[in-house]
Amino acid sequence: MAIIEIVQGNGEGAPRRLGVRIGWFVAIWAFSAATFFAVAALVHLVVPK
């Protein structure tokens, strides 16, 4: 995965452009938010009322 290659080490391989860094931040944030809501929806379906 590309993110693993960027995170490894002390950051010398991190993208230099600010736009790329912001893009990675937004992508990770969006993925984590979507995962949270997906898990919440599954729990809502499984737990009886």
Image (cartoon, rainbow, N blue to C red):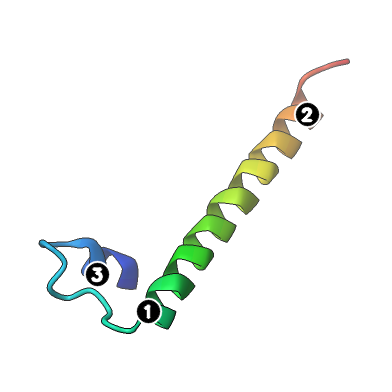
The answer to whether residue 36 is left or right of residue 23 is: right
Q: Earlier in the sequence, mark 3 or mark 1?
A: 3
Q: Quadrant of residue 9?
A: bottom left
Q: Position of residue 44 (x, y in %)?
A: 78, 29
**Disc 3: CA contacts within 10 A as few (<14), some (14-19) or many (>=20):** some
Q: Amino acid at mark 3?
A: Ile
Q: Position of residue 23 (x, y in %)?
A: 47, 74
Q: Position of residue 41 (x, y in %)?
A: 75, 38
Q: Amino acid at mark 2?
A: His
**Disc 1: CA contacts within 10 A as few (<14), some (14-19) or many (>=20):** few
Quick check: 40 above or below 24? Answer: above
SS at badge 1 = helix
- Please give the residue where the numbered disc 1 appears in the rendered image: 18
The answer to whether residue 23 is left or right of residue 45 is: left
- Please give the residue where the numbered disc 3 appears in the rendered image: 6
Question: The N terminus appears in which quarter of the rendering?
Answer: bottom left
Residue at 53% across / 56% down in the picture? 29
The answer to whether residue 31 is left or right of residue 19 is: right
Label drawn at residue 44: 2
